[in-house]
Image (cartoon, helix red, strand yellow):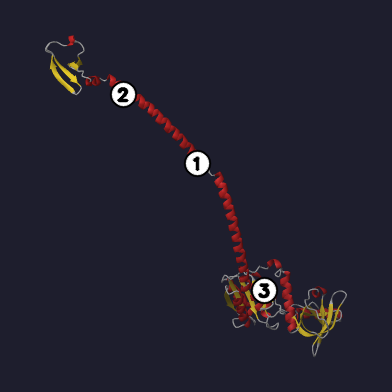
């Protein structure tokens, strides 16, 4: 839909200001001129006292005047250091009404070629840093003795062979789990993110994110913002061993630990077997010595307790009471024997007396006992002539009849 003009161009004389304003409106109504990237060389770079920057952008056949307002200039990551630098600028085309000239109003500036990549690198780095993704408080400690070590890299990379050699030499107890991915190219960042998630699912204790050295373009996959956020959010500690010692990527800053090389990353996540053996030997010697000392101390303490137990043992009292019981028993036995002897003597005396009084004893001396009807006859008037009586003598009895 064509909007009606703000100006009436019926035949009359126009002012310069009006025509310049009309032309500016035409420029700003053109969508193609409001989102423009231009590449060229910097010329006549100047920053005014107001903070605004003025320069010319030119190529082999043309030039255009450019302005960067102070508010945009303060946010620039990259600023040219000299005239002649090749840059890529973003902004819009409009008209400066006072001078009646059109110019490029720039809101972003990057060096051309590799410089543009570096500027993008700095911009992503600044953005993530401002969000706190590089803060030390977010870094996870590495496990001291990992059981499973995840490696995210290309299966054909020399870096993988270096990592495996180091891990097998230093800490063969750990299991190595490879999560293969491309490490270069446009699809590499998404593949690396997927590989990270996959190896986390394998219950690894630590992850090595690695690739060999290369140019900024070769390592660019590790400067991807989405990958950086995935590394920062990874629940497993991540060690970045990317490129050579002089190479830095965004992944290095968000990882929990940055290693200068892939081999160094393998060394960081693995204890040294030789050092462990030396420590174990030292621990063994110390442990044996401590056990011996503990045994000696225990033996001494046991002897002290045995002496105290003997001194305080109830056996002493038991032996004393046993002896006292034996004495009492002996005394009781003698007393009982004496008492029995007295009783025996008394019994003998009584027996003798009984024997003296026993009628049978009298019978043995020639006497007899006459009984009439089971009654002892002691007087003559107890019987009459013809009565039957019984006569008891010492060895029995016999019947008799009274004759007179």
Provide residue 18's location: percent of width, then percent of height.
84, 79
Q: Is residue 314 above or below residue 99?
A: above
Are there few (<14), some (14-19), or many (20+) residues within 10 Å of tag 1? Answer: few
- Of badges 2 and 1, nearer the viewer stands 2
Quarter of the rendering occupied by the C terminus:
top left
Which of the 4 image quarters holds residue 311?
Answer: top right
Q: Secondary structure at mark 1?
A: helix
Mark 2 and mark 1 residues within 8 Å of each other at the beta carbon: no
| Inter-mark Cα distance, 2 to 1 | 46 Å
Provide residue 127's location: percent of width, then percent of height.
73, 72
Q: Is residue 282 above or below residue 371?
A: below
- Which residue is under mark 3? 228
Q: Earlier in the sequence, mark 2 or mark 1?
A: 1
Q: Secondary structure at mark 3?
A: helix
- Which residue is under mark 1? 319
Observer-nearest of 225 and 340: 340
Residue at 31% over, 23% down = 351
- Which residue is under mark 2? 351
């Amino acid at each position: 839909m064509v909007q009606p003009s703000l100006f009436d161009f019926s035949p009359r004389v126009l002012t310069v200001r009006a025509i310049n304003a009309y032309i500016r409106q035409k420029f700003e109504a053109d969508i193609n001129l409001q989102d423009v990237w231009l590449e060229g060389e910097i010329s006549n770079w100047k920053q005014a006292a107001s903070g605004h920057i003025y320069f010319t952008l030119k190529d082999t056949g043309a030039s255009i005047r450019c302005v960067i307002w102070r508010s945009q200039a303060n946010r620039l990551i990259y600023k040219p250091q000299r005239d002649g630098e090749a840059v890529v600028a973003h902004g819009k085309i409009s008209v400066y009404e006072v001078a009646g000239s059109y110019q490029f109003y720039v809101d972003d500036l990057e060096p051309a070629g590799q410089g543009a990549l570096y500027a993008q690198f700095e911009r992503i780095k600044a953005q993530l840093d401002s969000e706190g993704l590089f803060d030390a408080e977010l870094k996870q400690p590495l496990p001291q003795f990992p059981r499973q070590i995840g490696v995210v890299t290309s299966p054909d990379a020399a870096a993988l062979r270096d990592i495996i050699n180091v891990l097998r030499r230093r800490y063969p107890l750990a299991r190595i789990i490879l999560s293969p991915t491309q490490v270069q190219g446009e699809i590499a960042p998404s593949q690396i993110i997927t590989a990270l998630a996959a190896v986390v699912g394998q219950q690894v204790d630590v992850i090595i994110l690695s690739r060999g050295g290369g140019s900024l373009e070769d390592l660019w996959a590790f400067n991807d913002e989405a990958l950086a956020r995935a590394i920062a959010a990874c629940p497993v500690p991540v060690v970045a061993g990317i490129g050579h010692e002089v190479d830095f990527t965004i992944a290095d800053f968000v990882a929990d630990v940055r290693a200068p090389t892939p081999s160094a990353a393998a060394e960081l996540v693995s204890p040294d077997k030789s050092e462990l053996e030396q420590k174990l030997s030292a621990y063994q010697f110390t442990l044996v010595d401590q056990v011996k000392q503990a045994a000696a101390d225990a033996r001494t303490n046991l002897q002290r307790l045995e002496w105290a137990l003997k001194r305080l043992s109830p056996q002493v009292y038991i032996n004393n009471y046993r002896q006292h019981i034996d004495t009492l028993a002996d005394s009781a036995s003698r007393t009982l024997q004496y008492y029995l002897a007295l009783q025996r003597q008394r019994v003998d005396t009584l027996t003798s007396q009984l024997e003296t009084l026993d009628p049978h004893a009298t019978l043995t001396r020639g006497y007899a006992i006459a009984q009439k009807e089971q009654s002892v006859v002691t007087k003559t008037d107890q019987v009459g002539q013809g009565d039957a009586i019984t006569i008891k003598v010492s060895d029995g009895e016999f019947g008799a009849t009274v004759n007179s």
